[in-house]
Amino acid sequence: VKVSEAREGGRPPVFCFAGGGALALTFLPLSRHLPEHDVYAFQQHGLERRGVPDWTIERSARRWVALMRIVQPRGPYVLVGHSLGGLVALEIARLLTESGEQVEHLALLDTYLPRTGPDTARLHFGRLEPREHRNPTVRAVRQRVDGALRRVLPSGTSWGDHVAKRLRAYTAGVLRHGGQRHFDAFFDQAELVTRRHHPTPFHGRATYVLADANPDAAGWSALLRGETETVRIAAEHSSLLREPHVADLATALRAAFATEHAPRS
């Protein structure tokens, strides 16, 4: 999706990659703060039109690289990824670098490192908590079943939620789930894909943006090995891309991108 168009004489386009279960249009607020760039945004394959989503980060990266090169055949490239999209952007940076292209800047927006199932379940992504059933008898039965099975599900996820998440994940893009559950299916699918991924270090210029409750402040130093600036923004994981926080985010990114074009002594 082309989110915005640069003014005349603008700088290279910015390619953005959305998080799991998120639309490309979540980057629209950010694009309004980057008037000097064309901004293109990508989302999981099959999210809006029925189709099987990519089951590896590399496959998503190769899909989006092919489309990026239609827009911009040669580098330097500017990449921005939020959440899951950060892992995709990192993989795209690897593919482009290995093919001899230059990645001018890589920005990861509150992207978490891949984790096992139990670790992932403890993370907070700012999603709505499920409501308890209105019927007290049903609530009581659920609590007893969940309590008994919590020992064999170390993630702490209730048995019903655990089964529902797996079903949604493996049917994402194939079945049409109603309302918010459709996006939840792609979020759950992205969670499984992330667990299986092993990122490759990036040696170029990068910006890592942390929102509230991000546990990976130090962990990314092993993967972002070039000149990297860490930016902290007091925002929740998803609200990072919405006003008023996106204004602070855009200020940080514009400064980072401008550095690439500043004369060096």
Image (cartoon, rainbow, N blue to C red):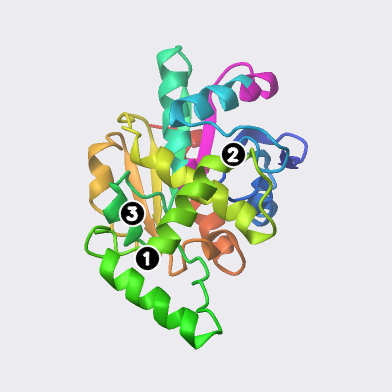
Question: In whole angstroms, how far apart are the C-alphas of marks 1 and 2?
Answer: 27 Å
Question: Local crowd at mark 2 within 10 Å, few (<14), some, or many (≥20)?
Answer: many
Quarter where residue 199 is shown: top left
Picture residue at 27% right of the left edge, 55% below the top: 119
Quarter where residue 9 is shown: top right
Picture residue at 35% right of the left edge, 48% below the top: 229
Q: Earlier in the sequence, mark 2 or mark 3?
A: 2
Q: Which mark is residue 44?
A: 2
Q: Which mark is residue 120?
A: 3
Residue type at numbered disc 1: Ser
> Residue 106: horizontal and vertical position, in percent?
45, 37
Q: Is residue 51 visible?
A: yes
Q: Which residues are magenta?
A: 67-85
Residue type at numbered disc 2: Gln
Picture residue at 69% right of the left edge, 52% below the top: 28
The residue beneath circle 1 is: 158
Q: Is residue 69 magenta?
A: yes
Q: Is residue 254 visible?
A: no
